[in-house]
Amino acid sequence: MLQAVESRESVGSTLRDDYLKAYRFMVLSRILDEKLASLYRGGKIHGGVFLGKGQEALSVALGLALQKGDVYAPLIRDGAGRLAFGEPIIDALRTYLGSALGPMRGRDGNVHRGRPREGYLAMISHLGAMISVVNGTLMAKRFKKITGVVGAAVIGEGGTSTGAFHEAVNQAAVEKLPLVLVIANNQYAYSTPSSRQFACSNLTNKAVGYGITAHHVDGTDLLACLNTLSAAVKQAREGGGPQMVVAKLLRLCGHGEHDDAHYIDPRLKNSPIGRDCIKVAEDYLLQQTWADEGAIQQIRQDAAQKIDDALTIVQREPTPDPFRENWCALASRHLSDSFEGPGNNVQ
Amino acid sequence: MSITYLEAIREAQAKALADDPRVFIYGQDVGAFGGAFKATKNLAQQFPGRVIDSPISEDAMVGAAIGAAIEGMRPIIEMQFADFSTPGFNQIINHAATLYWRTQTPCPITIRLPSGGTSGSGPFHSQSMEAIYAHYPGVIVMTPATVEDAYSMLLEAVAIDDPVIFCEHKYLYYHLKADKLPTEAMPVGKARIARAGRDLTIVAYSAMLHEALAVAEELATEGTEIEVVDLRTIKPLDTDTVMASVARTGRLLCVGEAWPWGGVTAEVIARVATEGFGLLDAPPQRLNAKDTPIPYHPNLWSTHRPTARSIATAARNLLRS
């Protein structure tokens, strides 16, 4: 969690420093995404690759607003938030490339990674399911009389249609938990447009029904995201109950790298929500003279170097060995069922 | 003094709460009201803040239990009826059951399922769901048939570092009594020879154990000695004890209150047939509920599920074969 430590020390630093730090994570995430896409096209990755292009500003703003002791349940497009929360670059590469040394050791892959005992939850695929799990961590902290912590869960607009979403938001409201629920309305759930997903004028309307506070933010604007997410996290931390943050933006990639996203309406691409948040951030950095072209280029080069260094390590690491796998799903190994019939012993 | 199966479940939870500050109970109406069946009677008063009413949200109930377990707690979830665990199914089998395998983070949660049929309960308050949970890796499934096991196995369920599906049978809640609570118990995962015999093995669990024991009693008057095996847990399934019994008797009848397709009786027979075919003097048989939803009316219900009468018929047929 070295990067998280660094982020904590930023408290009290200038807006310029916060913005630049966030921008660095965004660039790191984007270049990591591009590297993953290239590894995927090169046949080096088994299974899918899911990128966060267009969602980096929102994602990083949440990751930076969280502190050690908080709980974070990112979703599939939260590469930037994961890095900002403290996930080492190598964890992403190890999981995507199936290294036996990664946190998931080849047992799970791609975006399904985390370190739950460190407050970094490993998502399951079923949307909405992580929110109540975050609630449970917060209930446990309350039992243990740990105060001043928040739990954050991220979901897309598609995930708001699930029963699990409804149950969990209502549960957080009933229990008055310090939950920060970030909804990235990126206009498409795989190929389904938001018009086929919900009928309210704005997803923040849902917060009214649950009796919780809502915030709305332009997800393409890093400054707005930093301000809104830090305010929402602060409110939750200070006892304001669950906070819903709805960000409007556009997914600038396919659902996964297998998807060419031909269905995305070109009018959306050319609208303000179709802006690339990284380009918006760069323009702002230049406009504020917080960075010049050379500094931006240097940030990109540094990011690429870090990723290449990690990749060099991971590519030499062993992949999981089925003969060394213990094939036991239980922590209580002595309670494993035995399927030692002659038919099941055939390898 | 006598204690019922239901009281044993309450007492086990009281002891778990008293012994371990990590334990809490979460479920619908479990707080001041004491639960739909009173399995948590007075516990909210005895343990303030640790017996919590949930919204009617089975998915979120289990989700919260997983989160709490990740943080080191040992939650007990009460499903009001086993049938209502289906909205929480996803969290149980896709999340709780996969957590340790995926992340090396133990998930010590106990999910109590008031299971099985009682007269007049109908299709949605009578189900036996043990087999569907046992199908998934990463869970323990307990099916206690006695007051002693209801008590000791629930305490063990809370202590185990994995998700435990605790199938407590509603038919046994009030009628089954013991003199006192046990002070020691058989290990989890071990089946029990509930009655020794040499002519036929009946493998049963939960409420069906008592139907099987009644049959053994009845057939004993005809000179037949039936051995009855109480599985106690269906996952893990104690194949060794079953196989040893079949080695003694040569005949196997498996009885389950659940539906026939797949399930515990099919699993027991598959294991005996694949690993102990040579021990069998006759084709193994099984008896389950009929393959329809569970009927409401007592006339239909008492025929839908196996009973001492239908088990006795099956046993006699098997003894003749």
Image (cartoon, rainbow, N blue to C red):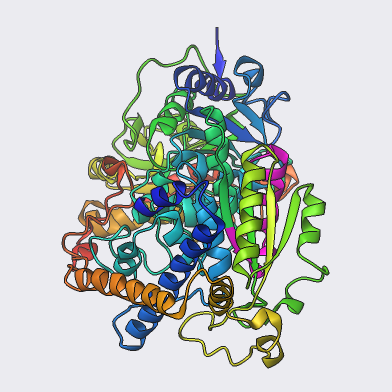
- Spot occupied by residue A35 in the image (x, y as percentages of width and height): 35, 80
Q: Is residue A175 magenta?
A: yes
Q: Is residue B55 highlighted in magenta?
A: no
Question: The C terminus of chain B appears in which quarter of the rendering?
Answer: bottom left
Residue at figure coordinates x 37%, y 78% from the top left: A36
Query: Which residue is located at x 38 percent, y 57 percent?
Result: A87
Residue B61 vertical placement versus A189 (above, below): above
Please identify the dominant SS of the magenta region: helix
Vertical placement of residue A283 versus B115, above or below: below
* Residue for point 38% across, 51% down: A115
A163 vs A264, nearest the viewer: A264
Residue B26 shown left or right of residue B121 in the figure: left
Q: Position of residue A170 (x, y in %)?
A: 72, 48
How many numbered circles does the render carry?
Answer: 0
Q: Is residue A136 above or below residue A109?
A: above
Quarter of the rendering containing residue A113: bottom left
The quadrant of the image that shows the N terminus of chain B is: top right
Q: Is residue B25 left or right of residue A69?
A: right
| Any part of residue A323 in sight | yes
Read off the magenta span. A154-178
Which of the two residues, A10 or B217, is positioned nearer the viewer here? A10
Q: Quadrant of residue B14?
A: top right
Residue B137: where, in percent of width, then height?
A: 38, 54
Report whether residue A126 is seen.
Answer: no
